[in-house]
Amino acid sequence: MYTRHILRRTRTGACLLAAAALLVSGCSSGSATSSGAAAAAEEAAALAPLPRSTPAALTSYYEQKPAWRDCGVPGFQCATLKAPLDYAEPSAGDIRLAVTRKKATGPGKRLGSLLVNPGGPGGSAVGYVQAYAGIGYPADVRARYDMVAVDPRGVARSEPVECLDGPGMDTYTRTDGTPDDAKETDKLVAAYRKFAEGCGADAPKLLRHVSTVEAARDMDIVRAALGDEKLNFVGASYGTFLGATYAGLFPDRAGRLVLDGAMDPSLPARRLNLEQTAGFDTAFTAFAKDCVRQSDCPLGGRGTGPGQVGKNLKAFFDELDARPIPTGDADGRRLTESLATIGVIAALYDEGAWPQLRESLTAAMREDDGAGLLVLSDSYYERDADGGYTNLMFANAAVNCLDLPPAFDSPDEVRRALPAFEKASPVFGEGLAWASLNCAYWPVRATGEARRIEAKGAAPIVVVGTTRDPATPYRWAEALAGQLSSARLLTYEGDGHTAYGRGSACVDSAINAYLLDGRPPADGKRCS
């Protein structure tokens, strides 16, 4: 999600709930309330902890010692660890996990390892720690902790799932995600089927074992291999679900956990997607209010309300649906409605990208130049200049479609839900509803379900929520904090996705004090 720097957090921190879909899928019934969310959490079963003792069949995995080697990135070492492909049948084979670390620099007493995960699912934790966290986290934190990351199974360097080649992904991302008739609906369904079939053909066994529960169990093997009694962890976006799942499975081994941009694990897929849709609408409203105050806003002038700004953008999307515009792309791609929508969504993850979004919209709407929005879309999909894609979108779908049963089983179900999604977001609701259909065609059945996570007996866990977060709505942080028995909710009143390291001295000092001194913030602390 970004043009390498400006949108760094859009890519590395995003919670792409319908990853393999042509759009990110979202959330909120529009009419959903906090009491409704609480009721949904009560209906979900609680995640049960695993036995404290390590099963004999897993002993060899827990006794591994990483063989660290230079990995070509200054200051970092790399290693490969093994985990069972199937925890229910450890003798069925192994999966190889890529791990990296940057040792604590000092001064001060070493506090152990600090694992980080940037989200996705599908974001490379190894890439994130090497490019950002290992050099950009506060110096005091890096001085006391070994900065460590493991790519979850199926992601990046850990036996990545692959689904389509570059040209195939180009076709997929340009498919009309808001079908107007039966022919366009059939084309969209065919695109979802082709994507899913590609994933199934690439990794038929692995695809059944890339769940978040399995990734959390892998982290406990990594913890043991690192020699740490407890897991210290900072997870962003989907990384909060991974971290909370770890705490739920191993509450006695949960150390200092920070869950930033929290997800609500108690919600089924349709509710998650609906509520995320509302989150993007909240973020777009904030952008719209800022845009009309600027002299270069192409969506309206001073005094134009967010509702009209949204109508103007939707009208532009409709024009692109009928007539895509040039981009100057070397591969001849034109800016379609689907690509433009993703480009706008990408920029909503970080308010620092709003000027770039205004500039890109101006060029597209007034000059028929779609290059800027295409750049934003490509950064979101992690498409490089040579037309290749990382496995972010492939892993995203593989994990999401295994973790929860599909949001929808058929196009007819999507059509019936459209009013609720369009109420949640008049601009993005239609596209995000159709994006939620992708898991209906997945080649393996979901093994997970929506569950509360209580992690009874765990040390204090800091849950961070941003009030106008587009991808993980603030209510999710409230919900997760309400489920975790030892949670401390830290609120950032602001824009953008996630809060740590985004410029709030209040947020950063509270989290740093917890990581360094073990002093969690007071529950309910608010920052701006």
Image: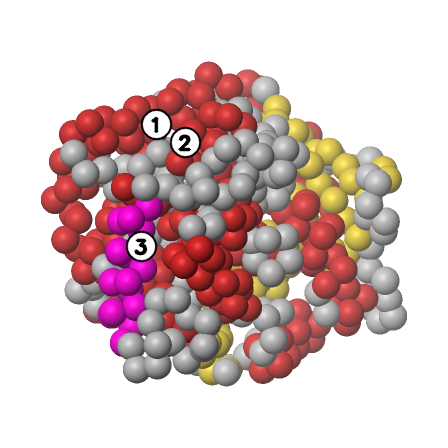
Residue 316's disc is: 3
- Give the alpha-carbon distance from disc 1 to disc 2, as whole Å: 6 Å
Question: How crowded is the residue under tag 3: few (<14 C-alpha within 10 Å), some, or many (20+)?
Answer: some
Question: In the drawing, what numbered circle is on residue 58?
Answer: none
- From the viewer's side, name the closer residue of 158 and 307: 307
Position of 384 relative to 148 (above/below):
above
Residue 245 is at least partly visible in this image: no
What residue range appears in magenta? 305-320
| Residue at left offset 50%, top offset 63% | 359
| Marks 3,1: beta carbons within 8 A | no
Question: What residue is rendered at 78% in x and 69% in y?
Answer: 139
Q: Please report the residue visible at 58 percent of the width from the left and 78 percent of the height from the top.
A: 504
Q: Amino acid at mark 3?
A: Phe
Residue 172 image label: 2
Which mark is first along the chain, 2 or 1?
2
Residue 430 visible in rendering: yes
